[in-house]
Image (cartoon, rainbow, N blue to C red):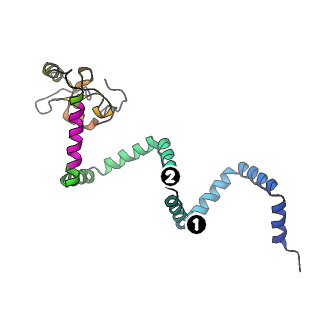
Amino acid sequence: MGFDRKAWRRAYYLTHREHELALAKVYAGNNKEKYKLGRQRNYQANKANVLEQTKAYAAAHPEQRRQIYRRYHAKNVYKERQSRSRYNLEHREERIAYVRAYRATEAGRLVAVAASQRRRARIREAQGTVSTEDVRRILSAEKCYLCRMRFTAKRPATLDHVIPLARGGKHEVANLAAAHLGCNSKKRARLENPITGQGVLI
Ligand SMILES: [Zn+2]
């Protein structure tokens, strides 16, 4: 029998395991780019397999999967938001049609009713501090506080909560301003000015 190189390698590895692992680590540290390329090549070659394994792992470890997703989300909120709004812009018509179709269903109708009830409840909670006179005064503003354009008969002033009620804003004079209906609904529950994109309102 000749020299069994494989068996010798295995025996050597087992007796020098720590040392071998340390060497491999140093090598990997010095060749990060190469390793990255290797991993990418490996992934491309075994894509179907890798995806299947990932899926199986995710299904078997729901809690870990949630944690990984949460970490990723926290790191990429900004990126996600940008790609979402790009997608929304590109698919505007489809989205409008989708929302309209959903609202027409019983489930969609109930969601809308619940949202409007929540909103009215929030206003009721904070009620009492805003008089009809206050509202009249706020609505008599010349310009929309969001786009700075004048109000017209066609685009009249509507009451807007500067800090949205959904974000903890109060229904009180200090938190009310006049805005076009369009500007108002573009803002929705965000804190940024939808027209200028700035983070601080007024
Ligand atoms: Zn406006």
> Are dots 1 and 2 in contact, CB under 8 Å?
no
Examine the structure image and report whether residue 147 is included in the region drawn in magenta. no
* Quarter residue 101 falls in: bottom left
Q: Position of residue 130 (x, y in %)?
A: 19, 21
The secondary structure type at the circle numbered 1 is helix
Q: Which residue in the structure is indicated by mark 1?
A: 45
Q: Position of residue 71 (x, y in %)?
A: 51, 45
Quadrant housing residue 4: bottom right
Compare marks 1 and 2 and give the one earlier in the sequence.
Answer: 1
Residue drawn at point x = 40 percent, y = 47 percent: 83
Can you tell which quarter of the image residue 187 is in? top left
**Rendering coords of residue 29 (x, y %):** 71, 48
- Image height of 66 relative to 146, above or below: below
Span of residues in magenta = 110-122
Q: Amino acid at mark 1?
A: Ala
Residue type at mark 2?
Answer: Glu
Question: Mark 2: few, some, or many residues within 10 Å (few <14, many ≥20)?
Answer: few
Q: Which mark is nearer the camera, 1 or 2?
A: 2
> Residue under circle 2?
63
Q: Residue at x 81, y 62 (%)?
A: 14
Q: Is residue 148 left or right of residue 65?
A: left
* In this view, 112 is above or below 129: below
Magenta segment, principal secondary structure? Answer: helix
Residue beneath the point at 32% across and 35% down: 190
The answer to whether 82 is drawn above or below residue 178 in the figure is below
Quadrant of the drawing holding the C terminus: top left
